[in-house]
Image: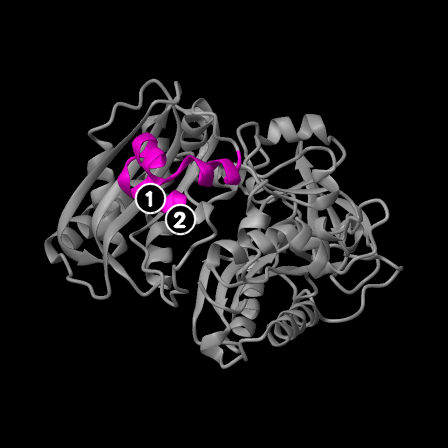
Amino acid sequence: MRPAPTILHLDMDAFFAAAEQAAKPSLRGKPVVVGGIGARGVVSTASYEARVFGVRSAMPTAQARRLCPNAAYLSPRFTLYRQVSEVVMELLHALSPLVEPLSLDEAFVDLEAGGVPAETAAVRAVGEQLRRDIRSATGLTGSVGLAGAKMLAKIASEAAKPNGLVVIEPGTERELLGPMTVRTLPGVGPATAETLRRAGIHTVAETAEAGEAELVRLLGRAHGAGLYAMALGQDDRPVVAERDAKSISVEDTFEVDLTDRTRVRSEVLRLADRCVQRLRAAGRSGRTVVIKVRNYDFSTLTRSETLRGPTDDPAVIREAAVRLLETVDTTGGVRLLGVGVSGLADFTQEDLFAQLATEREAEEAAAAAAAEEAAGGTEPHEAEEERPRRWHPGLDVVHDEYGAGWVQGSGVGRVTVRFETPWSAPGRVRTFAVEDPALRPGEPLPLVGGAPAGGQSSEPAILPKFLSPEPGDTGSVGEAISRR
């Protein structure tokens, strides 16, 4: 444990939803839910305005719609989120060479490695400046936790949400952690929490009081000993600059079960291509190809094949994924498909025989498609029918006359678009035919390009937890967190 709170944890506030509110002036101050918008979709992020109604991450979208029917339900725009994340991570790397990203919107930073004095006042000043820099560069807010250990820094940032900063002074850890639920501790999921509950252990203080021997008896040596140390506020895990991924994968859940074998195969090929894109973006290759199939009855199975050497060749990975699919019975209906690559490496070993076989197959398929089209096949008609599928709510579009906007909704051959930019006033809504040649997909606009007009605010709807005053409380933030 460090004698000074020099480990910083940053967590952007309702990241995906906040980015959408910053990009769309008409949604500021209103409930926004980002995630799968179909009947089987899942909430990825909910704005604080939506959370007031009980909407939470990982909740089925159908349940969220019942709780908050008037929210804006938007498809995620990962291109935008990655752009904003890169800006935020650059700001963190300016503070220290030791930055450990956990996701697009969350990271640990070792301020001591960056030369920041091991003093509370100094690290607090750095944290406050970071929050200002993030707001200036992205238009979004982030919450900062500072402590002498990673676990405590993360707890502090959670207490600071939204848009706040909390410092946990070394020496106050056990007093702070004691009344918290045992689920606060890293590694305590529903199963572990249930095991502890049956033993009468509900809080962190009760976990510490149970003793290491009892926790080892309940959970096993490694888990029990580690949990006991964390219940005492002890966490010596270092900030690791590089987190080596073990696998890269993509998956999709379908609104309607897929029963057509040809459609299932085409979806596997599409997912294989997306997986290769992610693989190459990470500068990696992989040796083992894995497919995941979830059936209509929620039973899930995986199949894998290990290649002769690591590769990032899309033809090789597509061919392996199709071979694996042939071993799976999908006649009952498929609700989810996934393709992944594991056994990652930093180099490739080309499989020329597989490439040649796949190229021949592709040439034969192309020749067959051309012959079918010449004979009056249905390929062109099917392509036209699929065009409206691109108009998902929230996606960027450009119109030749009205400029940049975003899709509010589509159906029965029409698409509704609101034309506004991140720095404009709330824009007007217009409706077009889905095949209107003047309307086309667009690219995300930068969130910071001017001041939003019309007095709109992108501030969170509620105060940070640690700023919610108790009756008669006039203490400082530091006193509040120490009291907790």
Q: Is residue 400 visible?
A: no
The residue wearing badge 2 is 229
Q: Residue at x 40, y 27 (%)?
A: 195
Q: CA distance from mark 1 to mark 2?
A: 6 Å
Q: Is residue 223 above or below residue 194?
A: below
Amino acid type at mark 2: Ala
> Which percent across, then down, holds residue 210?
42, 35
Magenta residue check for 269: no
Magenta residue check for 208: yes
Question: Looking at the rendered structure, which numbered label has been put on residue 132?
Answer: none
Disc 1 residue crowd, few under 14, some 14–19, many 20+, Cα 10 Å: some
In depth, the one of 109 and 37 nearer the eye is: 109
Q: Residue at x 83, y 56 (%)?
A: 474
The residue wearing badge 1 is 225
Amino acid type at mark 1: Ala
Horizontal side of residue 418 vs 363, given as left or right: right
